[in-house]
Image: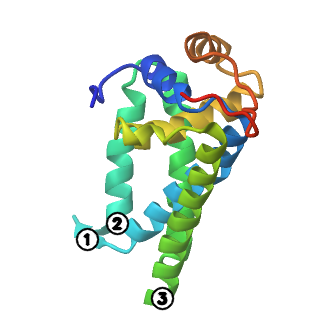
């Protein structure tokens, strides 16, 4: 496994190598947020008191993850990704306070369905998910989806161009005559 302390451009370039099929990228727009939300719900169930304040494990993990995004050398994508993940964790707390069954259903349900989307996308890609070779890909996924979403709106032009220059353009892989990778 490569170092988790690479800069955002290097991390996104490596991740993009596993995500060139446009259908795979689209499935990530659904799957990655569902996974992050599901993890947020599950972690929100673990609560502890610090200085008289009730905190959750979800916010503690979020603080570490946000710090990681903000220190990858590209403040814009770091802020955008930290904000997107923060919104998902905030929403996760809204459904985590119900019954045990509701908490588990939302958490595991979103997590499993999110991964189903991911694996469907990688069928189109014809390649295993990036985390299979580098676990840090689990953290890069939300950064990639954020870059792709905001890139489609004209943000991060330099970053998206550099990632595409390295990984190549997106395409639609011919499933009738797939090319082995």
Identify the residue shown where x is 38% and y is 74%.
45
Q: Is residue 116 left or right of residue 153?
A: left
Quarter that holds the C terminus = top right
User: Mark 2 packing: few (<14 Cα in 10 Å), some, or many (20+)?
Assistant: some
Callout in the foreground (3, 1): 3
* Count of picture labels: 3
| Residue on which disc 1 sits | 48
Can residue 107 be seen here? The reply is: yes
Identify the residue shown where x is 61% and y is 36%.
146
| Residue on which disc 2 sits | 56
CB-based contact (under 8 Å), mark 3 and mark 1: no
CB-based contact (under 8 Å), mark 2 and mark 1: yes
| Residue on which disc 3 sits | 101
Where residue 169 appears, x then y in whole percent? 69, 18
Structural distance between the alpha carbons of marks 3 and 1: 21 Å
Identify the residue shown where x is 71% and y is 43%.
26
> Where on the picture, by quarter, is residue 16?
top right
CB-based contact (under 8 Å), mark 3 and mark 2: no
Q: Secondary structure at mark 3?
A: helix
The residue positioned farthest toward the front in the image shown: 177
Q: Is residue 78 above or below residue 37?
A: above
């Amino acid at each position: 496994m490569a170092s988790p302390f690479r800069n955002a451009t290097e991390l996104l370039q490596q991740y993009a190598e596993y995500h060139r099929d446009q259908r795979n990228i689209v499935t990530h727009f659904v799957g990655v947020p569902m996974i992050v939300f599901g993890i947020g719900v599950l972690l929100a169930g673990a609560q502890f008191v610090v200085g008289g304040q009730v905190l959750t494990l979800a916010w503690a993990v979020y603080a570490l993850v946000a710090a990681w995004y903000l220190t990858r050398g590209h403040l814009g994508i770091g802020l955008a990704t930290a904000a997107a993940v923060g919104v998902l964790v905030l929403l996760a707390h809204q459904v985590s306070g119900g019954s045990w069954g509701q908490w588990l259903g939302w958490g595991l349900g979103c997590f499993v369905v999110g991964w189903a989307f991911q694996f469907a996308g990688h069928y189109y890609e014809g390649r295993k998910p990036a985390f299979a070779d580098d676990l840090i890909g689990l953290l890069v996924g939300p950064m990639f989806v954020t870059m792709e979403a905001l890139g489609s709106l004209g943000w991060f032009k330099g970053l998206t161009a550099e990632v595409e220059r390295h990984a190549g353009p997106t395409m639609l892989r011919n499933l009738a005559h797939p090319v082995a990778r």
